[in-house]
Image: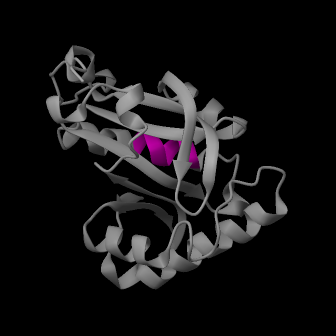
């Protein structure tokens, strides 16, 4: 079941991310996440408190999680229009699937639910960045209809400077979406 995380399960969420990071350290795709550094426990706690951390749960176990808020790295303004002139934009951060559940369709199901949630809560689009070598994630995002909007090097605290692709999903693509606006396509960058 997809839902916003609750404060009562904050420690469970921290442990989920620690397990994901341990598995990343043993995998061929190392995303440079580090326990309590990226994502930090403070970031996870704050995101839960602010209602910005979402989980997919089955039988009491967290199987997928991510943060969706309106905070972005300054590199986003070079790829996308000036967000201050745009409608509500959601940015996905630290999307993760429990290691034993990878490639079972749960990440796809989770993200589909997140996109439905975004559309129902009047987000005009959902954006994310992904390391260029993370091919499994790139394939998933493109399968779901995210469109690559650009690429560039970006500095991320606690990770460093890396090459990223930037993706966007227009919530107007969702059947039954209450978002009828034109979103970022009508924005102009007047800088």
**Secondary structure of the magenta portion, mostly?**
helix
Does 137 lie within the magenta span? no
Answer yes or no: is residue 5 visible.
yes
x%, y% of residue 104? 67, 47
Q: Is residue 66 above or below residue 189?
A: below
x%, y% of residue 188? 22, 17
Q: Quadrant of the C terminus?
A: top left
x%, y% of residue 151? 55, 27
Of the pair 13 and 127, the residue shown nearer to us: 127
> On the rendered structure, is 185 left or right of 107?
left
Answer yes or no: is residue 60 visible.
no
Q: Quadrant of the N terminus?
A: bottom left
Residue in view at x 25 percent, y 36 percent: 119
Q: Which residues are magenta?
A: 107-113
Residue in view at x 74 percent, y 61 percent: 24
Residue in view at x 36 percent, y 46 percent: 72
């Amino acid at each position: 079941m997809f839902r916003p995380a609750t404060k009562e399960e904050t420690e469970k969420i921290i442990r989920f991310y620690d397990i994901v990071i341990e598995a990343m350290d043993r995998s061929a795709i190392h995303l440079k996440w580090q326990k309590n550094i990226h994502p930090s426990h403070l970031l996870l706690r704050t995101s839960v408190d602010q209602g910005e951390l979402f989980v997919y749960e089955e039988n009491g176990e967290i199987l997928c999680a991510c943060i969706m808020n309106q905070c972005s790295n300054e590199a986003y303004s070079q790829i996308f229009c000036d967000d201050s002139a745009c409608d509500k934009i959601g940015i996905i951060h630290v999307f993760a699937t429990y290691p034993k559940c990878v490639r079972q369709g749960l990440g796809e199901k989770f993200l589909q639910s997140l996109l439905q949630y975004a559309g129902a809560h009047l987000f005009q689009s959902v954006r994310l960045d992904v390391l260029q070598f993370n091919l499994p994630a790139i394939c998933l995002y493109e399968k779901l209809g995210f469109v690559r909007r650009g690429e560039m090097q970006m500095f991320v605290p606690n990770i460093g400077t890396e090459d990223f692709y930037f993706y966007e999903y227009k919530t107007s693509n969702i059947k039954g979406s209450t978002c009828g606006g034109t979103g970022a396509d009508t924005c102009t960058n007047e800088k």
